[in-house]
Amino acid sequence: MSNKETLPDWKRKLHEVIYEADTPAGKTFDVAILLVILISVALVMMESVSWMLAKYATEFYIAEWVITVIFTIEYILRIITINKPKRYIFSFFGIVDLLSTLPSYIGFLFGGANLLFAIRALRLLRVFRVLKITRYVGESQKLISALNNSKAKILVFLFAVLIICIIAGTLMHLVEGENGGFNNIPLSIYWCIVTLTTVGFGDIAPVTPVGRLIASLIMITGYGIIAVPTGIVSAEYSKATDAPKNTQACRNCNETKHLDNAEYCHRCGYELND
Amino acid sequence: MSNKETLPDWKRKLHEVIYEADTPAGKTFDVAILLVILISVALVMMESVSWMLAKYATEFYIAEWVITVIFTIEYILRIITINKPKRYIFSFFGIVDLLSTLPSYIGFLFGGANLLFAIRALRLLRVFRVLKITRYVGESQKLISALNNSKAKILVFLFAVLIICIIAGTLMHLVEGENGGFNNIPLSIYWCIVTLTTVGFGDIAPVTPVGRLIASLIMITGYGIIAVPTGIVSAEYSKATDAPKNTQACRNCNETKHLDNAEYCHRCGYELND
Amino acid sequence: MSNKETLPDWKRKLHEVIYEADTPAGKTFDVAILLVILISVALVMMESVSWMLAKYATEFYIAEWVITVIFTIEYILRIITINKPKRYIFSFFGIVDLLSTLPSYIGFLFGGANLLFAIRALRLLRVFRVLKITRYVGESQKLISALNNSKAKILVFLFAVLIICIIAGTLMHLVEGENGGFNNIPLSIYWCIVTLTTVGFGDIAPVTPVGRLIASLIMITGYGIIAVPTGIVSAEYSKATDAPKNTQACRNCNETKHLDNAEYCHRCGYELND
Amino acid sequence: MSNKETLPDWKRKLHEVIYEADTPAGKTFDVAILLVILISVALVMMESVSWMLAKYATEFYIAEWVITVIFTIEYILRIITINKPKRYIFSFFGIVDLLSTLPSYIGFLFGGANLLFAIRALRLLRVFRVLKITRYVGESQKLISALNNSKAKILVFLFAVLIICIIAGTLMHLVEGENGGFNNIPLSIYWCIVTLTTVGFGDIAPVTPVGRLIASLIMITGYGIIAVPTGIVSAEYSKATDAPKNTQACRNCNETKHLDNAEYCHRCGYELND
């Protein structure tokens, strides 16, 4: 890549190790960083278990700082080995990388920055980078493209679901009142979402006959319309898989995407050679 | 539109603002009304939370009347600016608009008309009007057409599900009795619907071995037949998307199924006329 | 139909009314019987509600006997107006009809035959007979044919699900023991079915970390494999809908099912006329 | 098979009975072994029910040893009647067969080897061997091939789901704390899996408004993305069923995609050679 030419030699080599996953060194680096991320996520999890925190407080403290230092070095290396650092800094992974080094420093200065620890889990998305060399990436892209094509439809669908939940939630609040725990409308809407998505915790449940009748209708609706997003993604995914079968190009006008049984170019009428 | 010609000029202009979403003024009006609807729905929700009602009772009272006045003015304007008011008054949105202005007046005269507040949420469907200018509407129409085509089949399916629920509900009442809360058949049927739709609240649950065996069969049935509506909508939606868009036929060899951008027949090379 | 010729005239007329749904009289009879079935099912439901039984005991008793007499007369009429009564008596609806008249008589002789009341609900399937004249029947048949084609696959799938449940159930019993209510293996298997089908009552739930880990795996498995029956029915249903597009028959050998773009019969080579 | 030629005559006959399911003797043997497996699984289940163990302790003890002896004899016979015993011993069923004879011996020597009893259920997979002769095997293979093709995509999907669960679980722990039972992050992740898969036990449930809002988002996400694996399997299965079966090309016009029963080319009428 031409933008690397202006970098000194050691930076170019480091860039290859850090940013690329095709060379052995690059792959080793990516796997190593992924391991550190996994360990850091596991540490955050274990720290949240009270008896573990009580028993291994010092070990957690040391491990936390070791990981923070590794992440900080990685972040600095990523900035200095790239030609246009801004593109990295303001990219999705650039922001995630910065935010995942911050909690320890903020905790050291002010104490308590727990919310930022959740951001570390986002770093796990790096795993898809390591998998890039495998066949998984083609599958991911097909999936993402199918989901992208379905986005508008699924949003329309979810918005319709939300309106159903608001109406049904208001109804349930009026019908059930404080009996089954439908104390106010937002709570009833929450219950509607729990029910319509067929989750059904059971912490709130209707107790009056009319409330149970409405609940039955909501459940059957949810059971019936779960078909809609499935149908959409299914159809889109079929299309994404079926799409480009015919690869012949016209010798006259270079048009591609001909029908499978085409004998003449549909754009210029020139005869096609199979 | 010809029916607007008989209206005086100011009515015609107002009609454009109120009923059309293509002009800037029309879009602004629609978005403004949508905001008022959103606020009114949010108010109804917040009023239902007891501590909020206790704290902001006066504010809610004032806001309620302001919104009612806005809705009333909008309703009157919609009637006088249209040439055939009856078509609006008895349309779906006409009835919804009327019912959503009434609760405050009824509450003022008789006190308590809570049920009508739920109707206000229906006004949120207006959001699809505002989205009309975007590409979302095409998606909605494909969805609605797929659902429309699936309607008969899904009704047949839901009716079969209901018969299963009645039979299984009666069985569960006989087997479980008052043990697990299966006090009577309607309640058992409610439980069957909760189970078959995989919601599973858990407020009622079988406790006898035979009851649990039947419950297992119901659950596996529900898990197996959830495939049916999904399969239907999926197939219908695929059809709606695949549907033959290009209907031109070659004048030379009568070949059809040309690509949308075809200018020459792919079979004989003859020029196509669009 | 030739088998009716041997019946006396009044029997033939009654046969038309009772067995056929195409004539106005036949349709009226079917709708009337369906109404009586609906009332009888509603009565069984209401009788199970204790306060209703206490209040309207006499009315239920009378209504029960009126319905039993109607069902008995219908059953006798169906037998005497048909040429080959055995075919009706041993058909699905023949057995259901007999069993739905019996509970009252058995209750009169021995007291208590509640299990048979559940059978009455099966009579509701008659509703599909009445719908026969509408377009719903075509849809039902497509559904039934898609389900029939999927039967073998869905059975293989359900059997695999059952083996997963047995293995996971045994594991959960060993891991959780009496902690979360996994008292014995059948109960644990019941819990596995509840979980794998995503119903999740919550009356039994794992409490140990290892149990929760296994439960997570079961849930993700259930979430992943729900796709299988859906995919099967979806594909079968698509096929059932797509199937017969080309209806031309060869003038030479009468072969049908030609490809859409076929110009010559694929069986005898004779030219096809479109 | 040539490798059986080197075995003595009685071994060859036994091999046919034990390893093959096509001959009547082989089928009888397979069904008999399957029955013993079913009984052994039923016994393990019943033994876990405390009142049954108390009542029939001796009977269970005897039956257990009878089954163990049968399994041991079967295992020895399988080894001595095969030419290359190692291939059987280290095959999936070889290991399962060994492990399912061990628990009784280990229990006799050391006491308690309950975990191995769960392995016995794996022997139930033999049922597919007995079904081999029926049409079910074709269906299984189509299913397995569709699942195999979907494997990579479903793994990518499940990994994405896991990352969502880790992030949402950490968030819920921070937001809810010990209120709703979100005591630590692993527990919150468990709850996220329970919720995202729409199981919803309800033993842990959010109680704060913010927690319920996040829970609603998780549920709607789960409801929306359940479409993804379904869409994948559905599309793969359609492909597996549609796959091009007929590969013959016309010698005259080179047209392909003939019907399976075509004898003449549907395009030029030339006779096809199979």
Image (spheres, coloured by chain):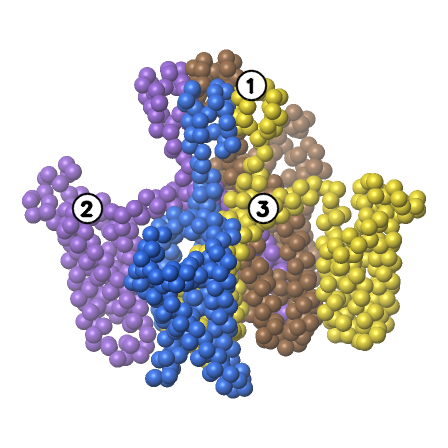
Chain colours: A purple, B brown, C yellow, D blue
Nearer to us in this view, A163 or D182 = D182
Q: Is residue C9 left or right of residue D197?
A: right
Where residue D168 appears, x then y in whole percent? 38, 61
Say which amino acid is labelled 2: Asp
Q: CA distance from mark 2 to mark 1?
A: 59 Å
Q: Nearer the viewer, mark 2 or mark 1?
A: 1
Q: Residue at 76% of width from left, 56% of height from top?
A: C90
Foreground tag (3 vs 1): 1
Mark 1 and mark 2 in contact (Cβ < 8 Å)? no
Q: CA distance from mark 2 to mark 3?
A: 48 Å
Residue placed at 37% from the left, 63% from the top? D11
Amino acid type, label 1: Glu
Q: Name the residue carrying label 1.
A: C271
Considering the numbered disc 2 on the image, is that residue within a helix, a strand or a loop? loop
**Rendered view: B111 above or below D182:** above
Chain bearing tag 2 is A
| Residue picked out by circle 3 | C146
Q: Nearer the viewer, residue D48 or B212?
A: D48
Classify C28 as above or below D195. Answer: above
Quarter placement of the C terminus of chain C: top right
Q: Earlier in the sequence, mark 3 or mark 1?
A: 3
Q: Residue at x 51, y 52 (%)?
A: D134
Residue A185 spot, x, y in % from top left: 56, 62
Q: Is residue C261 left or right of residue A262?
A: right
Who's the residue at 60% across and 76% down the image? B208
Residue wearing tag 2: A22
Q: Amino acid at mark 3?
A: Ala
- Asked whether residue C102 is in view, the answer is yes
User: At numbered mark 1, what does the secondary structure look like: helix, strand or loop?
Assistant: loop
Q: Nearer the viewer, mark 2 or mark 3?
A: 3
